[in-house]
Image (spheres, rainbow, N blue to C red):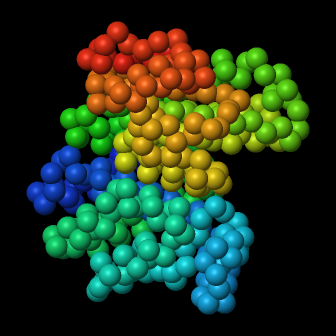
């Protein structure tokens, strides 16, 4: 990470100092991560917020789908917020009610991110501990605009926060993200054989990660392609089981102006939600060492009835109690 941004993760995580005593260490990330995403989203929305607010009143009596298209157009992004508030203007009283209203004013795709974090539950607990105003003010003073913190650096900040969250939760950090140097190497190898995407203006490619985590492979692919060919576009698709990782991935794709409907939540092995899609590239760091007994039937049925028309034509691990080792990278 650029030294200009290297102190940001530590500064953001210092919110934990306010939480100690009232919250368990394992809960710190469930407060810090969604607040970081919230601040990032509002900073990215700021340049067009006045246009959205001016149009929102005109859209109140319109069909929901039509209104959403208009507001998205005004925002110039794949999400918007129709509340005049932000973390700087929540006030000192009724902070909980104001923050709830503010979050509910996001467009559906963005609002879902906070639902997966159970954000409402945690800000109620913050309010009960008389900490909500202080935490909100802390994040309000962090500049996470795209001009100050580019998307690539923001991805690294998310990655570092996830690592700290995993450590504080006594979880395995590898379940949440792949080290950036591994992502970079793997991505460069995949693109190496595609001469057209490296040089042809306007070319569009798709990339898929069935175990997307926080979206590291998707983000790195987009950054790598942009460096090679700024006039090319990479469309991201992914699926992730862990709710917090899924929420962060969606948040990252939102600020990259990707269609977040392409990011699905659920177990890829037992419930493939992108089964009808095809992709130009696939990159994955599968959950090595994870037991697959709970989803044994779905995996074996796909292997038996679909063969090579499915994903397991080459076979499955020797028994459901064996650790799952994927050869589908």
* Coordinates of residue 47 in the picture (x, y in percent): 65, 70
In the rendered view, would you say 303 is above or below 144?
above
In the rendered view, would you say 242 is above or below 78?
above
Quarter of the image with the C terminus is: top right
Farthest residue, direction left: 21
* Coordinates of residue 53 in the picture (x, y in percent): 61, 83
- Side of 216 relative to 322 (left or right): right
Q: Residue at x 76, y 17 (%)?
A: 193
In the rendered view, would you say 100 is above or below 192?
below
- Side of 163 relative to 264 (left or right): left
Q: Residue at x 30, y 18 (%)?
A: 320
Q: Nearer the viewer, residue 50 or 88?
A: 50
Q: Residue at x 41, y 34 (%)?
A: 270
* Coordinates of residue 307 in the picture (x, y in percent): 55, 18
Q: Is residue 3 visible?
A: no
* Coordinates of residue 15 in the picture (x, y in percent): 29, 56
In the rendered view, would you say 204 is above or below 91?
above
- Side of 283 relative to 244 (left or right): right
Q: Residue at x 43, y 25 (%)?
A: 301
Q: Quadrant of residue 132?
A: bottom left
Q: Is residue 190 visible?
A: yes
Q: Quadrant of residue 221?
A: top right
């Amino acid at each position: 990470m650029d030294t200009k941004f290297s102190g940001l993760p530590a500064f953001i995580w210092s919110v934990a100092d306010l939480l100690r005593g009232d919250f368990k260490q394992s809960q710190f990330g469930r407060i810090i991560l969604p607040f970081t995403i919230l601040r990032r989203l509002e900073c990215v929305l700021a340049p067009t917020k006045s246009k959205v607010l001016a149009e929102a009143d005109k859209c109140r009596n319109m069909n929901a789908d039509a209104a959403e298209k208009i507001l998205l157009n005004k925002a110039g992004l794949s999400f918007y917020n129709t509340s005049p508030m932000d973390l700087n203007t929540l006030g000192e009283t009724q902070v909980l009610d104001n923050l709830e209203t503010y979050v509910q004013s996001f467009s559906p795709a963005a609002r879902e991110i906070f639902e997966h974090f159970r954000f409402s539950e945690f800000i109620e607990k913050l309010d009960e501990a008389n900490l909500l105003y202080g935490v909100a003010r802390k994040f309000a003073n962090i500049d996470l605009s795209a001009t100050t913190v580019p998307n690539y650096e923001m991805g690294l900040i998310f990655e570092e926060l996830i690592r700290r969250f995993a450590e504080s939760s006594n979880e395995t950090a590898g379940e949440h993200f792949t080290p950036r140097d591994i992502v970079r190497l793997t991505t460069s190898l995949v693109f190496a054989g595609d001469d057209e995407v490296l040089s042809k203006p306007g070319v569009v490619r798709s990339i898929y990660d069935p175990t997307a985590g926080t979206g590291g492979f998707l983000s790195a692919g987009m950054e790598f392609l942009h460096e090679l060919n700024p006039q090319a576009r990479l469309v991201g698709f992914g699926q992730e089981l862990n709710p917090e990782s899924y929420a962060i991935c969606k948040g990252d794709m939102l600020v990259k102006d990707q269609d977040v409907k392409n990011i699905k939540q659920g177990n890829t092995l037992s419930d493939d939600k992108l089964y009808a899609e095809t992709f130009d590239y696939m990159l994955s760091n599968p959950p090595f060492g994870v037991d697959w007994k709970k989803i044994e039937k779905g995996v074996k049925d796909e292997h038996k009835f679909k063969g090579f028309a499915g994903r397991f034509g080459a076979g499955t691990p020797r028994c459901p109690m064996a650790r799952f080792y994927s050869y589908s990278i």
